[in-house]
Amino acid sequence: MTVTKTLARSVRLRVFWRSLFIQAGYNPRGQQSLGLTYALLPALKALYPDPRAEGEAVQRHLATTFNTHPYVATAMVGGILHHEERIARGEAPPASAQHFKASLMGPLAALGDGFFWFSLRPACGALSAALYPWLGVWCALLFLVLFNAVHVTARARFFLLGYRHGDGIVAHLSRANISRWGERLRAVAAASAGALAAYLSVVFANRSGLSVPLLTGACLLIAVLSFAVAVGRGARWAALYGSALLAIVAGALQ
């Protein structure tokens, strides 16, 4: 019986599509292992025509814990396909796919958290919120378009890099300089939030009859104090209560 040496494009597309739902099978025992195995299943069936060999391949992915950032997980799914092809051809031991997963789960999770959760999402949200005076409720749609366009494109790119380069994906991700892009996105988020705060302070001052320069200066002072409190150790509760007090005062003045 001939073993498939290279996965067909249609099979790779099915694996990528399934990898978008890797979180759907999250469980306390294997975490994302069930979702990962579900994503890999079309490829494992193609690579291992013998049901026994297929069962062994399924078992080695299902029995081990897998947990990383769901968006960057596509890089690992592609890399696992790269290794499974080599395993099916007899060029690598079955443990190679497990070693690949174990070595990259943590680093890629940190990379995904830093870029998608702490950079891209705040930037898209702050920029969309800053455009609310002109777009109205359509700014919510803008957020969805911006965020999903970037993260879906990134997931497809990660998958291709993992499939083509296997362990070499580390070097390619390093050259992509994702951390620098994260810094730029955080700068966009800060600038958008600052612009929105300035706009709202002027609008609020005009509606409440307060002095615009006075209210703007007070907002700036609160921002500086909040930053000082946030970077201080053991004092972040003060920023929380201060924000609540500010919201109460603002509501009372309306």
Image (spheres, grey):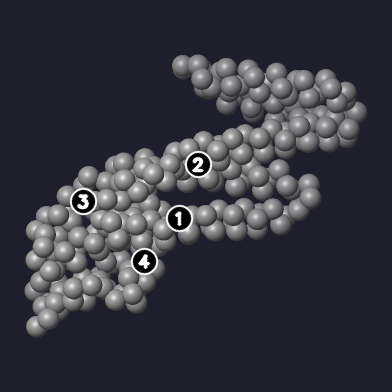
Question: Which kind of residue does numbered mark 4 sit on?
Answer: Phe
Asked if the residue at tag 3 contacts the one at tag 2, i.e. Cβ–Cβ closer than 8 Å, the answer is no
Using the image, tell me which numbered label, if any, was put on residue 178.
Answer: none
Q: Nearer the viewer, mark 4 or mark 1?
A: 1
Question: Which kind of residue does numbered mark 1 sit on?
Answer: Ala
Residue carrying label 2: 181
Question: Which kind of residue does numbered mark 2 sit on?
Answer: Trp
Using the image, tell me which numbered label, if any, was put on residue 154.
Answer: 1
Question: Which kind of residue does numbered mark 3 sit on?
Answer: Phe
Image quadrant in which the C terminus is located:
top right
Q: Where is residue 163 in the image (x, y as percent from the top left)?
A: 30, 61
Q: Residues within 10 Å of mark 3 (few under 14, many from 20)?
A: some
Residue at the image point whose x is 34% and y is 57% from the top? 161
Residue carrying label 4: 16
N-terminal label among 2 and 3? 3
Q: How crowded is mark 1: few (under 14 residues within 10 Å), some or many (20 or more)?
A: some
